[in-house]
Image: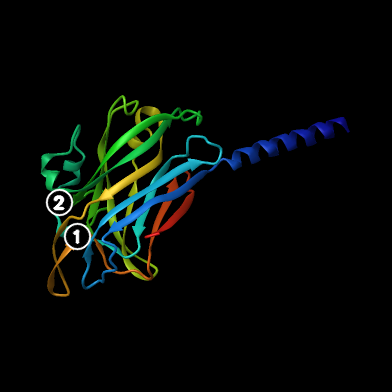
Amino acid sequence: MRKLYIAVAAAVVAALAVAGIAVAANTYEVDIASGSPNAKGSPSKPVPVSLNFGYEVGDTENLRPSIINQYFIASEGIKYFPKARPTCTFSQASESPKYNSACNKAVLGNGTIDNQAGAPTDRTQKLPCAVKLTLLNISNGPGVTKKRGAMAIRIDTDPPACPIPVHGALAAPIFDVKIEGIPTSELRFRVPDDLTHPGGIDNSVVDTVSHVLKKTGKVKIGGKTRTVGFASAVGRKGRTRLVRVTFVSEDGQRETATTTYPK
């Protein structure tokens, strides 16, 4: 009987341990979303806009968040027109320690990323790693098609802002989707291992802010030449726009966070 009690007690302890581990999970919030002007637009007459966008990633147990290595980002009725703006190549955008000067006219915006770094075996470690973003219009790269184009997300940081220097870019191909039945562009990208695990440490994104500037150019729509922005409003279902971000962790867990603007 005593052996039975010991076995039961061990099982309870093990169950509690597993439950404790299961409680810790990433949290997600799209905390910044705005555009200017706040125009509805239409597919035949897109309205050039600027965009401000940001999200936060946390942990329910106040640990360093688990690493996210795939993102899907879209704003209802916002279409991207990469052919309206100058481009550079992905290799030019990826040069170190700075992107090639051929990309100067391809700059679309900027931003920041706050990360927490630490040993893979200890998620209580939260070494700060602040990164500057540059958004670039690129003509090629992993997963990029000439028809849809892509954005390069250029990442730059050095000590003391981050424990190690990081300089490079990742390609974010543009995909055509619909949100609330409205044509929308979605950026989809995977973060490579040299950015999620630089120098053998784990690097978790905790806060991101991006600004897409109102950069205009001309494209043909329905046989007519129109002035559009790289980002343009082409419609929305109601008075507000839905912003949607899907996060995919390294172990394949998928979560989606949304918000609307204007508030």
* Amino acid type assigned to the residue bearing label 1 in the image: Gly
Name the N-terminal-most of marks 2 and 1.
2
The quarter of the rendered structure image containing the C terminus is: bottom left
Task: Specify the farthest residue to the right.
Answer: 1
Q: Nearer the viewer, residue 23 or 215?
A: 215
- Which residue does the image show at 25% across and 37% down from the upper left? 168
Secondary structure under tag 1 reads: strand
Mark closer to the observer (2, 1): 1
Image position, residue 56 (x, y; %): 42, 44
The quarter of the rendered structure image containing the N terminus is: top right
**Crowding at label 2, few (<14), some or many (≥20) Cα neighbours within 10 Å?**
many
* Amino acid type assigned to the residue bearing label 2 in the image: Thr
- Which residue does the image show at 33% across and 55% down from the upper left? 34
Q: Name the residue that disc number 2 marks.
A: 87
Q: In the picture provided, is 43 more to the left or to the right than 179?
A: left
Task: Examine the rendered structure and indicate whether residue 148 appears above or below residue 163.
Answer: below
Q: Nearer the viewer, residue 138 or 85?
A: 85
Disc 2 to disc 1: CB gap under 8 Å: no
Image position, residue 232 (x, y; %): 24, 62
Q: Name the residue that disc number 1 marks.
A: 229
